[in-house]
Amino acid sequence: MRNLLIFITKYNAFFLFLIFMISSLIIYIKYNSFQKASFINSTNQVTGNLYAKADEFKGYLSLKEVNDKLAKENAELRNELCSSKYVDTISKHQVTDSVYKQQYVYIPAQVISNSVNKRNNYLTISRGSKDGIAKGMGVTSADGVVGKVVFVGEHLSIVQSLLHKDSRFSAMLATNKAIGYLQWGEDMDPHKGLLVDVSNNAQPKVGELVVTSELSLFPAGIPIGKVSKLNAKGGGFFLNMEVALSVDFGKLEYVDVVINKFALEQTTLEAQEKKADE
């Protein structure tokens, strides 16, 4: 308290100046209509700007909630696509009854961590076994193929990115359906991949769309990229070509995990077939 009194005594002239100045401003504004109107208008503008900034900040804080909602809606829309279903055709009395049944289900997830500058790149996503995620499931984004699930926890999962030396997905040229395999190139460019083992009869063109085939983890027709450069393998019966990837892996925020309802049945049958051939 003593220090406060000393401080006020030391700067009493300054405080008296402030008191007189504020009092004179109040009297000047209160008893002059023009100045009063100007002051009120200025105050309203300042208050309006503060409210606008506060609302903008509030909107920024709610972006995550909005993005989560949009990701969920996108997944629901993909679930309704014909490419996510198969046709169950039953012939009765020469009448064909075609019914679409669900084969693929999309589960949205947020990307928690991601790498693009290593030889083997992975993503961590915000879904795990409690959400129905299992090892081997494909992962896509709004732009195309991302990778496949390799490790699953209760709440989180690890995705082996397409940008990985061991990633290999069945793909095809969208125009003539010639099938090959999509893998990452040796130059480690996160924007390019290689479509290999395509028949020499395919006659691909630069700019042609490359999509998933029916032999992949994904529904057929999901974008992978576009042919950017043609390279024939020397002396072989197959072609390989450079592909500009449709997914910008450095900007991934949300992905969809693709659940194939027939995956277990297919894996079991293929295992039985392999055992029978031994």
Image (tube, rainbow, N blue to C red):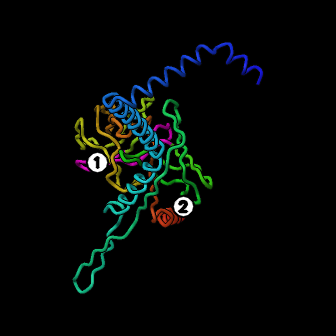
In what element is the residue under mark 2?
loop
Determine which quarter of the picture holds residue 246: top left
Q: Amino acid at mark 1?
A: Ala
Residue drawn at x 54%, y 16% is 17
- Give the distance between the C-alpha atoms of the residues marked 1 and 2, in whole angstroms: 33 Å
In what element is the residue under mark 1?
loop
Q: Nearer the viewer, residue 141 or 230?
A: 141
Is residue 235 in sight in this rendering? Answer: no
Is-magenta flag for residue 171? yes
Determine which quarter of the picture holds residue 227: top left
Q: Position of residue 45 (x, y in %)?
A: 36, 34
Principal secondary structure, stretch drawn in magenta: strand
Residue drawn at x 48%, y 41% is 161
Q: Residues within 10 Å of mark 2 (few under 14, many from 20)?
A: few
Q: Position of residue 169 (x, y in %)?
A: 42, 47
Q: Position of residue 19 (x, y in %)?
A: 54, 22
> Quick one: quadrant of the C terminus?
bottom right
Q: Position of residue 212 (x, y in %)?
A: 35, 50
Q: Nearer the viewer, residue 24 or 103?
A: 24
Residue, disc 2: 132
Q: Which circle's residue, 1 or 2, is located before the other in the chain? A: 2
Image disc number at residue 231:
none
Extent of the magenta region: 161-180
Q: Are marks 1 and 2 in contact (CB under 8 Å)?
A: no
Determine which quarter of the picture holds residue 16: top right
Residue, disc 1: 178
Which of discs 1 and 2 lies nearer the camera? The answer is: 2
Q: In screen coordinates, is 139 left or right of 18?
A: left
Image: 179 above or below 102: above
Image: 202 above or below 26: below
Q: Amino acid at mark 2?
A: Gly
Residue drawn at x 43%, y 50% is 66
